[in-house]
Image: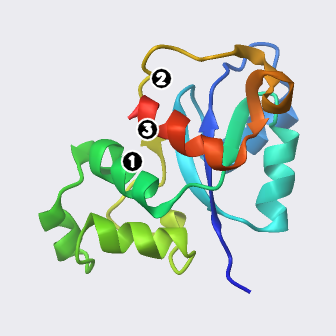
Amino acid sequence: MQMKSLLAIRIRGGVNCTKRVEDTLRMLRVDRNNYATILDDRPDYRGMLQKAKDYVTWGEPDVETIRVVLEKRGEAPGGVRLSEEHLNEIGYGGFAQLAEKLHSCELDINKLEGVKPFFRLHPPKKGFKRTVKRPFRDKGELGYRGEAINELARRMC
């Protein structure tokens, strides 16, 4: 069975957030608003996302979205923006090859040397389309959104 990747984006702050949820958000590597990370679709991560559903949104990104996020918002340690040369130095042919490996879960972004395991995104261009405090299925922005994560991620790059 082919494992797929998930893109999780934090869209709400931590005011009145319980300690357990704060710890879960930290373990997911989305410590602040507009931070995103790429996760494997494992039951462990699904449970953590469900625990933090009132603060994050997530879904299955396509390879092109992962490539765009890496290219525009990816960083190396020290706050240096990722470049093709940097990826060649650490053993990857470029953004497309790295995006393909992350999408197919051959590679875990948390174990990748020379690349920060999170992305600092902008607020979405033209704002959120719906109310931020409600679940996605109820005309809100929070929780699981499936393929619609691609559109949000690209507006936040």
| Residue type at numbered disc 2 | Pro
Q: Is residue 119 above or below residue 109?
A: above
Q: Is residue 5 left or right of residue 103?
A: right
Q: Which residue is mark 1?
A: 69
Asked if the residue at tag 3 contacts the one at tag 2, i.e. Cβ–Cβ closer than 8 Å, the answer is no
On residue 124, the disc is: 2
| Residue type at numbered disc 3 | Arg
Is residue 77 in view from this perspective?
no
Q: Residue furthest bottom?
A: 1
| Screen quadrant of the N terminus | bottom right
Mark before the other along the chain sequence, 2 or 3: 2
Q: Which residue is mark 3?
A: 154
Viewer-proximal residue among 136 and 95: 136
C-alpha distance separating marks 2 and 3: 8 Å
| Residue type at numbered disc 1 | Val
Asked if the residue at tag 1 contacts the one at tag 3, i.e. Cβ–Cβ closer than 8 Å, the answer is no
| Screen quadrant of the C terminus | top left
Q: Residue furthest left?
A: 85
C-alpha distance separating marks 3 and 1: 7 Å
User: Which of labels 3 and 1 is toward the front?
Assistant: 3
C-alpha distance separating marks 2 and 1: 13 Å
Q: Is residue 148 above or below residue 90?
A: above
Residue at left 36%, top 59%? Answer: 115
* Residue 58 falls in image quadrant: top right
**SS class, disc 3:** helix
Mark before the other along the chain sequence, 2 or 1: 1
Tag 1: Cα neighbours inside 10 Å, few (<14), some, or many (≥20)? many
**SS class, disc 1:** helix
Viewer-proximal residue among 66 and 80: 66
Q: Is residue 9 left or right of residue 43?
A: left
